[in-house]
Image: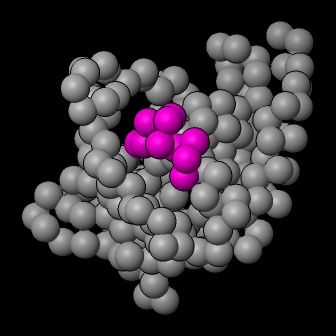
Amino acid sequence: MTLDNDRATPMSRTPCRPMKAQRLMAVVGFGAAVLSGQAGAQPVNEWMTDCAIDQTTDKQECTLWIMISSGVRKPTDILSFSYSMSKASFAVVGTAAADRARVRVDANQPVEITGCVNAICPMLPQPSAVLLEQMRTGSKVSVEMMTKRGNTIGPYGVSLSIFDTEYQQAVKKQQTIKKPAAR
């Protein structure tokens, strides 16, 4: 399955919804950390949940993500694979020269993501929903990114043994409404 963020279906052209500026900046910031080597202090191959209050909606915004790599920790060999709870969609973040990414759970059909911009390869919500269900019951996810020059980062395989538990915790955190401090 190939996805282009400008195509909802092969026959229709529907632009994807833009990310909120705060979430986009967080993803871009992580991408910059990966590219600069500053992400090296983050745990690798470990599912994590990050939450923040969206300043425009005062709602909790959580992202379930993992930084994945081979045993070598070069900045160009690290990818981030994330699931935005509020957007209900996945994204692969890696090199600024990203052209496309591919994600596969167990022996299921791989999902190819095109339309990468500035190191970010976002997946549309519909295929993300299918992938999420596969990941919640699967045993391994494989993620790779292809560059515009034809180089491949990965594929990196990651265990899904605790993914569903982490997902359930992220759902609970996302539903937690925190009131912002009085201004």
Q: Quadrant of residue 147?
A: bottom left
Q: Position of residue 166 (x, y in %)?
A: 78, 58
Q: Quadrant of the C terminus?
A: top right
173 sits left or right of 43 in the view: right
Judge left or right: residue 59 versus residue 82.
right
Residue 180 appears in the picture as rendered: yes
Q: Residue at x 87, y 41 (%)?
A: 172
Task: Tell whether 182 sits left or right of 25.
Answer: right
> Camera-side residue: 66 or 104?
104
Q: Residue at x 88, y 31 (%)?
A: 176
Q: Residue at x 24, y 64 (%)?
A: 146
Quadrant of residue 181 within the rendered picture = top right
- Does residue 135 show up magenta in the picture? no
Characterize the magenta stretch by its predominant secondary structure: helix
| Image height of 69 relative to 4, above or below | below
Which residue is located at x 27 percent, y 38 percent?
A: 4
Segment colored magenta: 122-131
Residue 36 seen in render: no
Taking the magenta stretch, the answer to whether it contains residue 129 is yes
